[in-house]
């Protein structure tokens, strides 16, 4: 008889939320992670009493009431609202694209003037259905915004030309006709007090935990537990049988600066092609910090390779096609649940991952 009901591979949101529900249902879970910490990419480190988001900025936001109710049981959230800035050369623009952005670009003042300007900008590109990100951006916002605020950033971030990227990537970038700089449209938003680690400690309480533990060096994982919840890379699980899926990674270069305030905002995107990093995150602003020094992180995106962190799936037609084939293998795998950004090869937000893990748990435990 296996010692555990569940072997959960990965202590990020999917694994931890599933493990929490399993434990609550009286099941015995072993949670392993190859990193030396829990929390997946939401993991935070403290430097000079500043909470640092180690794997990129994680601003929690959701419209899913059930998820908000669930997550707020494990932490108090502050009222941080994400309002990133875009910098091109020495020009600063507000994001998401809104009246402040249009005013700075074109001098327009009213929504009507802005709509007229955008209609004029997009007219030549609106006739056909966009088949790639460039066509979508041009048909949505026109060449001025595309050239200044989208093209450089996106090509650095994804390492591919906009004309080769799927239009869906910029579904995340809303277009507004008011002066609202809130990046998200969701009803709930904030950062957990003290960072994300406390949430994961609470979620995983009652599970057995092994860190720095690589699933692939376990000889006979099926003998350890009745079922497996796998949240790692799906192509690696199947030993790259059909070839490797592509991912993007980021090199995070973090430094402490002897100044109280470096850039006046949590996130500044560098949207030109020349600056080698995509953004600078100044962590203290997520918690309205008043510390005497500050910690900043520059993000340099790169193509993923073995030994690096796979952070973003590249959801273009080629990779999505390959993923589908792995998905078919996954469906035939008995007693294994595949979930999360890497196992589902999806550009998930945190709330969507939590929702998906809650749904899986509801199904398994008939909640
Ligand atoms: N994007 C852009 N300019 C920006 C910010 C974002 O063109 O200043 C595009 C870019 O293609 C990016 C996508 O919008 O990959 C999604 O951005 P988001 O900020 O949601 O990405 P994340 O925070 O998940 O890295």
Image (cartoon, rainbow, N blue to C red):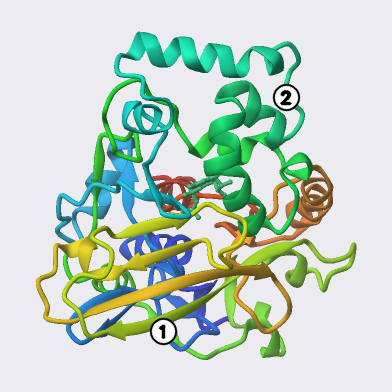
Q: Quadrant of the N terminus?
A: bottom right
Which label is found at residue 363?
Answer: none
Q: CA distance from mark 2 to mark 1?
A: 42 Å
Q: Is residue 179 visible?
A: yes
Mark 2 residue's CB less than 8 Å from ligand 1: no
The residue that label 2 is drawn on is: 130
SS type, badge 1: loop
Q: Nearer the viewer, residue 193 or 24?
A: 193
Residue 325 in percent (x, y) is at 84, 51
Q: Quadrant of residue 25?
A: bottom left
Residue 323 in percent (x, y) is at 77, 52
Q: Nearer the viewer, residue 272 or 168?
A: 272
Q: Nearer the viewer, residue 126 or 48?
A: 126
> From what the image shows, is residue 240 above or below residue 184?
below
Q: Residues within 10 Å of mark 1 (few under 14, many from 20)?
A: some
Which label is found at residue 37?
Answer: 1
Residue ID at (37%, 60%): 58
Residue ID at (36%, 33%): 104
Report the side of 328 relative to 339 (left or right). right
Q: Nearer the viewer, mark 2 or mark 1?
A: 2
Q: Quadrant of the C terminus?
A: top left
SS type, badge 2: loop
> From what the image shows, is residue 107 above or below residue 289?
above
Report the side of 365 relative to 20 (left or right). right
Query: Which residue is outermost to the right?
Result: 242
Residue ID at (65%, 64%): 248
Q: Quadrant of residue 64?
A: top left
């Amino acid at each position: 008889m296996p010692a555990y009901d569940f072997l959960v591979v990965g202590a990020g949101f999917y694994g931890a939320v599933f493990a929490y529900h399993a434990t609550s249902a009286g099941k015995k879970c072993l949670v392993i992670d190859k990193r030396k910490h829990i929390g997946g990419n939401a993991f935070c480190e403290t430097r000079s009493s500043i909470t640092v988001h180690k794997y990129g900025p994680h601003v929690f936001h959701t419209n899913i009431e059930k998820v908000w109710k669930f997550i707020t049981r494990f932490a108090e959230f502050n009222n941080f609202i994400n309002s990133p800035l875009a910098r091109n050369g020495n020009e600063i623009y507000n994001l998401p694209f809104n009246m402040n952005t249009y005013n700075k670009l074109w001098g327009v003042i009213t929504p009507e003037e802005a709509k007229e300007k955008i209609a004029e900008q997009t007219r030549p590109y609106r006739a056909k259905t966009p088949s790639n990100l460039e066509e979508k951006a041009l048909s949505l916002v026109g060449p001025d915004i595309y050239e200044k605020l989208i093209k450089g950033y996106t090509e650095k971030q994804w390492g591919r030309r906009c004309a080769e990227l799927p239009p869906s990537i910029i579904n995340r970038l809303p277009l507004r006709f008011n002066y609202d700089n809130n990046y998200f449209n969701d009803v709930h938003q904030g950062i957990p007090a003290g960072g994300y680690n406390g949430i994961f400690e609470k979620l995983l309480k009652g599970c057995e935990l092994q860190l720095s533990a690589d699933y692939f060096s376990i000889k006979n994982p099926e003998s350890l537990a009745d079922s497996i919840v796998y949240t790692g890379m799906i192509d690696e699980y199947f030993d790259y049988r059909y070839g490797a899926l592509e991912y993007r990674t980021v090199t995070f270069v973090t430094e402490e600066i002897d100044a109280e305030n470096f850039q006046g905002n949590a996130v500044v995107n560098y949207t030109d092609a020349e600056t080698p990093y995509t953004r600078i995150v100044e962590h203290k602003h997520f918690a309205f910090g008043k510390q005497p020094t500050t910690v900043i992180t520059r993000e340099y995106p790169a193509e993923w390779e073995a030994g690096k962190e796979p952070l973003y799936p590249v959801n273009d037609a080629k990779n999505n096609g390959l993923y589908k084939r792995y998905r078919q293998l996954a469906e035939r795998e008995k007693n294994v649940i595949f979930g999360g950004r890497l196992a589902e090869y999806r550009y998930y937000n945190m709330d969507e991952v939590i929702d998906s893990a809650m749904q899986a748990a509801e199904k398994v435990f008939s909640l």
